[in-house]
Image (cartoon, rainbow, N blue to C red):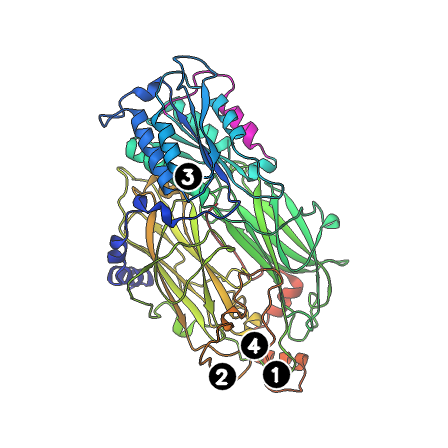
Amino acid sequence: MTRRHRRMAAVLTGGTLLALAAAPPAAAAPAAQRTVADDNGSLVMVLDSSGSMAEDDGSGGTRIEAARRAVGTVVDALPDGHPTGLRVYGADRPGGCTDTRLVRPVEPLDRAAIKRAVAGVEPRGDTPIGLALRRAAEDLPRAPEGSWDRRTILLVSDGEDTCGTPDPCEVAEELGGKGPSSATLRIDAIGFQVDGEAREQLRCVAAAGHGSYYDAPDAEALARQLQRASRLSAGGYRLEGERITGGRTADDAPTITPGQYTDTIGPGEKRWYAAELGDSTASAADDLAVTAVPQPGVPAASTDGLRLTLVRDERYRPRCDSAWGRFGQGAGAMPVTAAVSRVPSAGGDRGCDGPGRYLLEVERHSRPDSDRGRWPIELLFATEKPLAEGTVPAHSEPDYGPGGEDAPLPTSPPRDVEGGTGFNDARRVGPGVWRDELLPAQTRWYRVRVGWGQQLRYDVEFGNEPTVEDPAGVLTYVSTDVYGPTRVPVRPTSEFDTDALYRGEPAAVSNGTVPVAWTNRWEDEARAVPVRRAGEYYIGVGLDPNAARLAENVAVGFVLRVAVIGEERTGPQHGAPAVRERAAGAARDSSGPGGAGWSGPAVAAATGGAGAVLAAVLAAAYARSRRRTAARTAEAGGDGTNGTTRGGAW
């Protein structure tokens, strides 16, 4: 039996189908369970109330009646307090191209008020989409200086603009543009029983506005797509960090210190940043991780993404590390992370071992037909402290061993959990079985504490889900990635299936790490190098945007089975005893979210007197017997150890 078939058998026998069946339908998820973080954006719905909305929707009711019900389901599903408003057009008089009105201002969510407002809307007039979009942008509150608040216009129309001026596509392009606003303003469009030119116009509006187009052939689809678009807007990646502007060249690169930063990057652009790195007595590793957060689901090629390069700022600028982060699928954009590291060699005699000024180059690659909006990026710079003087670390652990594909995973009843929007609010989970759901183009994030000598192992299982009629030809994928405590991607080997085709039938993806060992940093294998610190490891689970054309439920449910394998040791040193009882504060050991200046506490000397450098050399002897090229990478560069990762939700 092949690995994939064995994993599918586990899905069918491990209780996933029962667990998912026991979950309430995604569309019925109680709104009271969702809360909104401060400064996470605003939404204004723009509803077509022109004369054609009085027509039969094919189910015995009118289109406007279906729209009223759909708006009601949206506000019930939005997070408490999410700023939401409602604008209509064509509702006040039989004809006229200035007929648009804000019926509910963009304020903290008042579900009853929005339902009352939409109940009073009657279809009457023309379809001035262009003017309504322009007014809707004015309805949205302006984001404070330095804020990453997402501002979303959600357009619902059953036809094309009937006024001609201003042209809806031109207005969307004007509002979205290619400047700073393209990173925070989004226009989604839903075509309600449209075809031909009307559909093409709405597609154009969404593309120009750095948003997504959703087709709604009937009332049920309208409610489903309206919920998806609105919840995706409200539940986007929470960016955090000091706002900076990277240099256009290495000469004007701003200097950063350990911490977290945000910036933007346009198609084909490069951003440069500088950092002062110490020698091996001051730093055991320096990590620079960059997460790009495009508008979710916008057009993107599988090869689009970021390329990171770390060089030493001297005459010949030797390359210390490089890495790619690509989307890996062409259905649309989702968050993507890449990282580079400077790990001093055991001997301290390589070109990138010494102290001094280093330069990080971040380059965006986008095909000409991909979305041209700017991407917000989040940059984490973390320095790891050396071991205490005299500490001899345990040998490296480059193999999966008991944590491989056949590792036993928990089979207990699942507990409901809501994953975070990104690294900053990733939901902390422990060993066990967890149940969550995904919107199309969304990624959920979790963090799991993994101690010295332990390894993470998990499966993500998707059960049967109803699909829309005639989904033939729709290809959609589920995927997962794992990251170290400082967001360095852990590249798996063929041991695990980290992505899978999903058609509404049972599917599974899996991943894990090797055991955590300090000397893993000197290994060759990309699966081992980032697994060099105890702390919180991040899990990302994504559903690609094409699922919006496949799934009948608003969101797709899944089960996450998490195991932390092995006995935890009290530290990285050779012969460290097992942890018998974790003190109340011990969970904080290196378990932060990869924040500013992250570094683990120094470990008490196990042998004493030998000196930190000598201890490191002794500990490296075993690792050096297994590898030849890792230390050379610090000087010569290459493709690094971090590779491609996927993600998905903003």
Q: Earlier in the sequence, mark 4 or mark 1?
A: 1
Residue stretch in magenta:
158-178
Q: Cα distance, mark 3 to mark 2?
A: 51 Å
Of tags 4 and 2, which is closer to the observer? 2
Q: Nearer the viewer, mark 3 or mark 1?
A: 3
Between tags 4 and 1, which lies in front?
1
Residue at the disc numbered 3: 230
Give the residue type at disc 1.
Answer: Ala
Q: Residue at x 64, y 83 (%)?
A: 390
Q: Residue flagged by tag 2: what amino acid is it?
A: Pro
Q: Nearer the viewer, residue 115 or 239?
A: 115
Label 4, label 3: how many angstroms apart (C-alpha)?
51 Å
Q: Quadrant of residue 120?
A: top left
Instruction: Work out whether 344 lies above or below 252.
Output: below
Q: Does 163 sit left or right of 391 as displayed?
A: left
Gap between marks 1 and 2, in whole Å? Answer: 14 Å
Pointer 1: what residue? 605
Residue for badge 4: 623
Quadrant hosting residue 600: bottom right
Q: SS of the residue at dot 2?
A: loop
What percent of the width, then of the height, locates residue 199?
A: 39, 26
State the CA–CA distance, disc 4 to disc 2.
22 Å
Image: 603 above or below 301: below
Residue at mark 4 to residue at mark 1: CA–CA distance: 21 Å
